[in-house]
Image (spheres, rainbow, N blue to C red):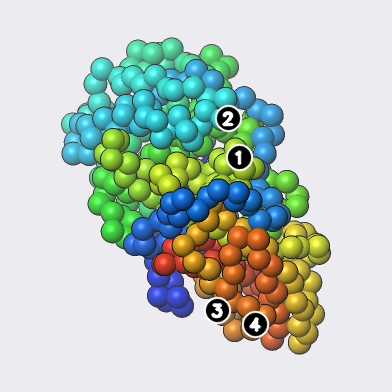
Amino acid sequence: MRVRASFIFSAIVGLMSISIGCGSKMSSSSSSASISWQFSSAAPELAQAGSGAGFVMGAHVGIPQVQTAAGAVLATPKIKVITFTEDSLGTPLKNMVSAFAASAELTEMVSEYGVGAPTVTTPTTSITNATTGVLPAVVSDTAIKAYISANFSTGFLGAADDQTIYIIMFPSSIIVSSTATAAGDFCKQGVLGFHDQYVDGSSGKKIAYAVILHCFDFPGLSSADTMTTTTSHEIVEALTDPYVNSAPAYAGLASSYSNWGVYMPGLEVGDMCELFQSSIYTPVALGYSIQRSWSNVAAAAGHNPCVPTPVGAVYFNAIPVLTDTVSYYDPTSSSSTPITASGVTIAVGSSRTIALQLFSDAPTSANWTVSAFEDPNMTYTHGADLSFSFDSTTGSNGSTIHMTIHVLRQDVYWSAEPVWIVSTLNGVKYYWPLLIGN
Ligand SMILES: [Zn+2]
């Protein structure tokens, strides 16, 4: 199951943080990564007119590529949207899916992965749950699968089809649960939606489906915008990783980028961008709030990997050069086996200096500022494990600056210290993760 979970407020940095978990197993909001917004209300830094001649992007460590495990994507996808008559958002959500499926934004997000524009159909009627009670007031994920399969024979959903994503938009009146009782209420676990897959018993077809919940709203977003943003995330991921269990596709990173796995709520293309506030936006032509997603093409070219990017926006960042493999413990796992990831090894009580490579994909209006902070929501001890100093806190494309990290104590939660490197210019912020192991 790939889950889109909640946002968390960070009192440490005073900014809203978002955490929308999408793991192959259920992850609760408390276990998900979260960081302050990539940029808050700042307009994007724009390329400097007339100054691009001869521009050469500074050397830097590559931006991660989301790898495929070679499972199929949906090359000619179909989407069936299932709503409830008693849900006032049902019709707007159906309309959103149709518009998003035909949008330039979706094409930009998924075409590089071999996904075509989806054909959207809706069942001839919505579910009228209030009067027919076809689904109980508490619906388990197991019951959702059974409901979908049952309606392949009733005609409501047509014949079982492994090229269709079945999206059920639940109203707030129905509790969707990970268990048979309300105790597993996804909303209370901070989950806004998920996509998953199962095999239909009678046809033997792999069935990809997504569930969108009407739980709570993102800060600053309406219920409708929260749900359309979640819907876009789940559609993009269901298209690029439809058979998450039996034949996973785009849902992983090379081991050299395994440190990202500490921070990210999942490694599907939606997950990789969801921490950043700048990923949520409303394209003018589309008119619905959606979430940007990870582009391997943009990443390989040194551009902002979360696409579509604002027209003319400059991407800039500071990437640490890592040579160590560090180990940590997953605090959400009962395993006593440490996990290894790329990072920097520094013994408790010691310091070490590392190089940060600054680069941008076009000239910036000025030098940007580089700083670092311990992840306020991931560090159990909340920001007192490390201290940082820099030989320079500003630079521009092509600069190398040096950051000295002193480890005061080990984070008891991870047995390692998750850090974000932040590049800031005119209020625009871009982030890079850095894991310190001891
Ligand atoms: Zn996801």
For residue 58, the mark is none
- Is residue 126 found left or right of 153 in the rendered image? left
Is there CB contact under 8 Å for labels 4 and 2? no
In-image side of 375 versus 164 (left or right): right
Q: Mark 4 to mark 1: distance in Å?
A: 33 Å
Label 2: which secondary element: helix
Of 249 and 127, the residue lying toward us:
249
- The amino acid type, in three-letter code, at marker 3 is His
Quick one: quadrant of the N terminus?
Answer: top right
* Residue corresponding to mark 3: 382
Q: Callout 1, which amino acid?
A: Asn
Q: Mark 1 points at which residue?
A: 296
Q: Are marks 2 and 1 in contact (CB under 8 Å)?
A: yes
Badge 4 or badge 3: first in the primary sequence: 3
The answer to which quarter of the image holds residue 174 is: top left
Q: Residue placed at 36% from the left, 25% from the top? A: 102
